[in-house]
Amino acid sequence: MSTEPEKPRMMKGNEALAEAAIRAGLQAYFGYPITPQSEILEYFTVEMPKRGGVALQAESELAAINMVYGAAAAGARAMTSSSSPGISLMQEGLSYMASAQLPCLVVNVSRGGPGLGTIQPAQSDYFQATKGGGHGDYHLIVLAPSTVQEMADFVFDAFRLAERYRNPAMILADGALGQMMEKVVLPPEGSLPRTEKPWATTGKPPWRERNYITSLYIEPDEMEGINLQLQKKYAEMQKEVRYQEVDTDDAEILVVAFGLAARIAQNAMEQARERGIKVGLLRPITLYPFPHEAIGNLTRNVVSVLVVEMNAGQMVEDVRLAVNGRRPVHFKGRMGGVIPSPEEVLEAIESVAESYRIPQE
Amino acid sequence: MEIPVATNGMEVVYRKPSTLTETPFHYCPGCGHGVAHRLLMEVVEEMGIQEKTIGVAPVGCSVFAYHYMNIDMQEAAHGRACAVATGIKRVMPDRFVFSYQGDGDLAAIGTGETIHTVNRGENILVVFINNAIYGMTGGQMAPTTLLGMVTSTTPYGREQPVMGFPLKITDLIAQLPGSYYVTRQAVHTPATVRKTKKAFRTAFEYQQHKKGTCFVEVVSNCPSGWKMTPVESNEWMEKNMFPAYPLGDLKVPHPILSQV
Ligand SMILES: Cc1ncc(C[n+]2csc(CCOP(=O)(O)OP(=O)(O)O)c2C)c(N)n1
């Protein structure tokens, strides 16, 4: 196999993600059109028949996630994608899959809500993505890309983690990341090995007991046992936490932001640095598991914390838990599909700096 | 655990198929679910397709079907069995895939999935147990509940102006070009049992043709939900259910096609 990486090419986030999924050995995709992610469904309906996979437009997101359930439980590498309203419809299925311990990938190219909302990008599905989303005590593995390159790369990470932990994984992107074009180097086809799935329902041969996939445990003791198993798994998952730090060494203000908001924050930060404000960035890459410890450790050395999100303040609750009252935590957010400008984030940084009168050299 | 039986040299003419587990059915006395399970599993054994069969259990009284059927199975969310079966069949097209669903599961909460699965002509078998009531949740009205029929949520009898008409979903299914073989049977007498078994066998054989969905409705009873003895429930079923849901084939493949 040639080790020479492919040449970078310009791609839309949605298309880069879809092509990466095929290269990650995707066997079945089920989806339903919704802006701003329909290119993913369209890409698969063009490519999957040519490349030996299944792509099916379902009659609803409800059907799509349950088709993923069936395919994943039969041992296939399966995924779906949607945007916020469609992801809401999938919550029942995700709860069942978390309980039945089925690996799959769900992509949320999210948009502003609540309700039918807007087709513009937002991060207002953070709670839904990281706190379970459906009924019962469970978590998804959640990865938050901030570039088109990461839209592609995280497909591999998501499948790897989903199969390692037998748990659904979500890529939480937004409409801007789905639609923007950037240079991307795609990972090579076939570079994600298949995992053994002895639990899959593939037809019972004489030499093994029947396999069945269920989320029903009618006896409370048994159901608690399953819950304990899940909780143990989530505890183990904490070691998969990923985040990026920028200029945190000497930072007096720590900005915490994920996805698109982190890119905007980084731009604002650079401007703030030019004005002598020592500001650093922590970008959570996994939203679940969340980098509590990293944020907790960093806050010991900073004066205050600023969280920037494209919502009314969701991740800020997790940051407050991590900071645990040791430092003040400020919030800057825009809602409803409005993308904050670097200038208004800069203003927020300046006003935080002002309030603590950090000497400006 | 196999229960030892002294046969004293006599020939065994009736036994449990190897495709059923040793777990005793939890169904109420006189309920048709157990008979339908057994017939389906007898067919799987006789066709020698245990290794290639994957079933989908619904939410309803037969939610534990996977405890009884000795094959690989998946338990679906309420109403989603057809979508789950679609997911399986699409990634394993050479397997025999079936869903097993009650009337609430298939014709109320799961109507969308049912219609679209058949309309795509998914090459699966849908087994539909129509007992005109929600058995598992304690006898509430189902989409197939007859007009005038008393249930815990139609205490004065089902009235059309309030609760609409009984949904003859199997007639609807037969209209869809995606369905290949559609039949309505019962399991309350030796003769109906034989016919239902034949229908299951025919459906599995057709599944290999890859020509569309096979749909077998079993008009059945619910002694507990109907508040009757098993015998009374079967009499009531013959008198009231069969006129509304007449037994027989609704759609059979063209004789030339069925040779394919
Ligand atoms: C989303 C959801 N809604 C409601 C229920 C409760 N529920 C369980 S079984 C059932 C009805 C089943 O009736 P039917 O499909 O006719 O099957 P039967 O029990 O009669 O065999 C209902 C409403 C559920 N489990 N999930």
Image: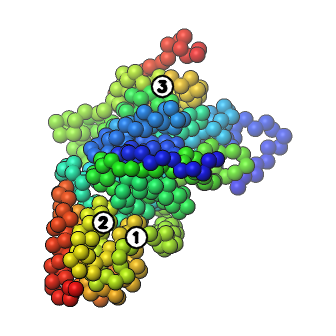
As shown in the figure, which amino acid type bears the numbered disc 2? Ala
- Spatial distance from mark 2 to mark 3, Cα to Cα? 50 Å
Front-most of residues B155 and B117: B117
Report the side of B122 relative to A266 (left or right).
Answer: right
- The circle on residue B212 is 3
Chain of the residue on which disc 2 is drawn: A
Report the side of A159 relative to A254 (left or right).
Answer: right
Count residues near mark 1 (Cα–Cα under 10 Å), then give few for <14, some for 14-19, many for 20+: few
Q: Quadrant of residue B154?
A: top left
- What residue does disc 1 label? A244
Chain of the residue on which disc 1 is drawn: A
Residues tagged 2 and 1 counted as in contact (Cβ below 8 A):
yes
Which badge, 2 or 1, comes first in the chain's sequence? 1
- Look at the numbered disc 1 and give the secondary structure of its residue: strand
Q: Please tell me which residue is depicted at 40% across the width and 66% down the height of the picture.
A: A285
Front-most of residues A343 and A136: A343
Q: Position of residue A180 (x, y in %)?
A: 30, 49
Check the image and name the residue furthest to the right.
B9
Q: Position of residue A247 (x, y in %)?
A: 35, 76
Count residues near mark 2 (Cα–Cα under 10 Å), then give few for <14, some for 14-19, many for 20+: many
Note whether B237 is above or below B105 in the view shown: above
- Look at the numbered disc 2 and give the secondary structure of its residue: helix
For the N terminus of chain B, the quadrant is bottom right
- Spatial distance from mark 1 to mark 3, Cα to Cα? 52 Å
Check the image and name the residue furthest to the top.
B256
